[in-house]
Amino acid sequence: MNNFNNILETIHMIERDKLDIRTITMGISLLDCCDTNGEIARQKIYKKITTLAKDLVKVGEEIEEKYGIPIINKRISVTPISIVAQACDDKNYVAFAQTLDAAAKAVGVNFIGGFSALVQKGYTKGDQILIESIPKALAVTDRVCSSINVGSTKAGINMNAVRDLGRIIKETAALTKDQESIGCAKLVVFANAVNDNPFMAGAFHGVTEAECVIHVGISGPGVVKVALEQVKGQPFDVVAETIKKTAFKITRVGQLVANEASEKLGVPFGIIDLSLAPTPAVGDSVARILEEIGLEACGCHGTTAALAMLNDAVKKGGVMASSHVGGLSGAFVPVSEDEGMIAAVKMGALTIDKLEAMTCVCSVGLDMIAIPGDTPASTISAIIADEAAIGVINNKTTGVRIIPVIGKSLGEEAEFGGLLGTGPIMKVSPFSSEAFIARGGRIPAPIHSFKN
Amino acid sequence: MNAYVSVMGMDKKGIIKEVATVLSNNGVNILDINQTIVRGCFTMVMFVDLSELTTDLAGLKAELSVPANAMNLRIKVQHDAIFSAMHTL
């Protein structure tokens, strides 16, 4: 029998501190579904997804039952559709999104990611068609997520794509204006996107990945917060060590679930993404961890340092607990999905500028930020450019998931529902970036990218 | 397969008897028991062998929900691997 106190600790983590497995994501390659006839390609895609993932939800539920730990989401990521679809002559790819949506519904997963394009160095024919298809694709589907990679440390930043995506985000918002512009919550613009991310909305199955793999994303902000409550007032050495130990424990559970899912589905294990992913529920917040470290409110001076230490300690603790770590791994800061961040924005402690600084040291970027619906497209593009620059120069992943909520302005909030939460409308700079964005072209790769 | 049955709630007479009866009726062998009461709060962890379980895991949980509801307890059944994974190298 295991130590009595250890058993109780595990039970408390799950019951009281909301430890869960955030997602089991099956990555599926669609490279063999290309066809010169779009309709045939879509039939192949539907058949492949519904065959490989037919037991995904059932297996997830069996594992939940066996170990008594919630597995919140079962999801699918696929090869970027711009690559798969461009063999055909279709002039828009909305029908491909509808096929993904139908396949996701058929197997019972709540999101499918991969309506994506990787355009950091330029557009192919398919990339351009896909990007122009995004607004309609996200408006007519429920479960499809889209992501575009516009920059990388090796390639620099594609400023034409940055310019276009400001407009695309506005169009997506307009087409879903009856639902708080929710289409934009399913669209991420990345720099240095990773090929094995299991988290939505940015998941896609990179072309260098295997045929079919299982990735697992863990969570557990509440567990870290409770652990830190036991070391109040102690030096940062102790804080970092406490976070490491906690991250180790929760990652071990993720590895156990990943191994089991991989074995039951007969699909190789890919990676564990050891991220602290908050939800709008009380007790499941990354902001509250930062406040437990000693900040009066998330966003005050010291927040960036606290987040940097948290992000690093989570990685260090988790790395030894898993055979393969990947994805984004670190701490997420999605504003509308984090109860503490929502509160911090409402009290004026957390601004978009501070969030930008935080994204220099956390694992993703400006995430789930609601802004006024009348924000110009060029301002959105400029926000993307700033985030991409942070990622490209610092050799890390950054992303922007921003929602210009049509019809809403400062002082109001957007209710996205479920795990997407509630977004208070945040202030953006009133000064114009129009001429900056109008230039287009490419920002060259930084000097430190030349390592060969 | 070995598992842990954990029982938590306010202390009262007959908790162990009721839980053990359900386990016994379903072919579950109790290998070890650890129990404590702190300020009236009852906590028990049983290490059990499920190899001769006569129902499935969901069925056992459903049967345990009867004493759980009657005595206002929280009862969980979890495979032992989750505890070993988290606490041993």
Image (cartoon, grey):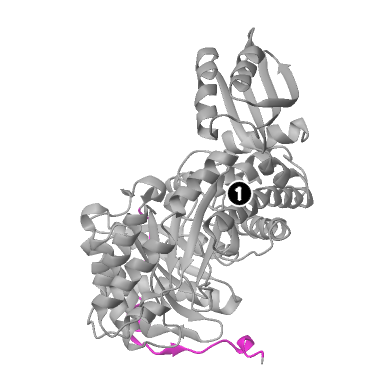
Residue A355 against residue A297 in the figure, above or below: below
Residue A277 against residue B68 in the figure, above or below: below
Q: Is residue A449 magenta?
A: yes
Q: Residue at x 39, y 90 (%)?
A: A441
| Residue that numbered label 1 is attached to | A290
Q: Secondary structure at mark 1?
A: helix
Within 10 angstroms of label 1, few (less than 14), some, or many (20 or more) residues?
many
Relative depth, front residue between A395 and A290 = A395
Please name the amino acid that badge 1 sits on: Leu
Position of A206 with respect to A117 (left or right) is right
Q: Residue at x 29, y 73 (%)?
A: A42
Image position, residue A35 (x, y; %): 31, 82
Image position, residue A34 (x, y; %): 35, 81
Considering the whole magenta stretch, tell me its main secondary structure: loop
Relative depth, front residue between A265 and A440 = A265
Relative depth, front residue between A409 and A40 = A40
Image position, residue A223 (x, y; %): 62, 42
Asked if one can make out residue A294 in the rendered structure from this viewpoint, the answer is yes
Q: Is residue A264 magenta?
A: no
Image position, residue A313 (x, y; %): 70, 57
Position of B73 with respect to B35 (left or right) is left
The N terminus of chain B sits in image quarter: top right
Chain containing mark 1: A
Which of the 4 quarters of the picture holds residue A124?
bottom left
Q: Residue at x 60, y 46 (%)?
A: A289
Asked if one can make out residue A377 in the rendered structure from this viewpoint, the answer is no
Magenta span covers which residues? A425-451
Residue extending farthest to the top is B13
Residue A204 against residue A153 in the figure, above or below: above
Q: Exactly how many numbered labels are in the figure?
A: 1
